[in-house]
Amino acid sequence: MQSRKSLKPEQTVFSWHTSGLMAGVDEAGRGPLAGPVVAAAVILDEFNPIKGLADSKKLTALRREKLYDEIQAKALCCSIALATAEEIDSLNILQATMLAMKRAVEGLRLKPGKVLVDGNRLPKLAMVAEAIVKGDALVPAISAASILAKVYRDRWCGDYHLQYPQYGFAGHKGYGTAEHLAALRLHGACPQHRRSFAPVAGVLR
C-alpha cells in the first residue's frame, strides 16, 4: 500500500499503522546540471536520539558535516545510493531520483516495515510507503536522510572539482550559476554534465 499525503507542520499523526522499523528517505541533487542524484535512507534509534535534525537546506555546511557523522554513528542503519548522470539522461531526472531512492531503501541492513519519503512522489518499494510534502522539516528520519544525501553529494562535487577545476564544482555544486554557465560555454561539457538538461544541451549544439 502506498499513498501520497500533504501534511501541515502541526500534524504528526500519519494515516496508517504498521509494525516494524520506520525509514526516512530524501534526495539531493535534482536541480544541478552535473553529477549524480543522491538518495539516503535512515532508520533512527529512538533510544539514541540526535539533537538538531532539520531540513538540510536550513543548516550550515559545518553543522551538516557534524550531523552527518553523528547520524552515521547513532542510527540503527543508513544507506546512501545514487543514480548517475548517464541514468538521469536515459531515464529523466524524476525516474532517476526514484531509482536512487529505491536503491537506498534496498541498501538498508535492516528491512523497514514502513518508509516515509520526502515530497509527493514514491519509488516502487516492497513495503508500505507514504510521500510527505516538506517531510524533511516534519519527520526526523527524513531530516537525517536529507543531511546524509546533501553532505555526500557536496563531497562528491568537491572530489570532482579536483579533476575538472575549470568548472568550479566545489563552489556551485553543479547548479546553473553564472560562473558555471560561463565555464560551460568556454570549455564545453565534461563527462558528468547532464546532456538532457537544457543549458548543457544548448552548449552541445
Image (cartoon, rainbow, N blue to C red):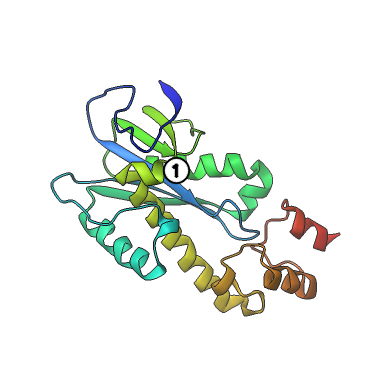
Pinpoint residue 89: horizontal percent, then vertical percent.
68, 49
Residue at point 60%, 41% (across, down): 94
SS of the residue under disc 1:
helix
Q: Image check: 84 left or right of 132?
A: right
Residue extending farthest front:
10
Residue wearing tag 1: 103
Pinpoint residue 40: horizontal percent, then vertical percent.
40, 49
Q: Image check: 146 left or right of 188?
A: left
- Residue 104 visible in the picture: no
- Residue 133 visible in the picture: yes
Rendered position, 153 above or below 131: below
Q: Identify which amino acid the numbered label 1 is placed on.
A: Arg
Q: Image check: 198 left or right of 17?
A: right
The tally of labels here is: 1
Pinpoint residue 92: horizontal percent, then vertical percent.
65, 43
Q: Image check: 96 left or right of 27?
A: right
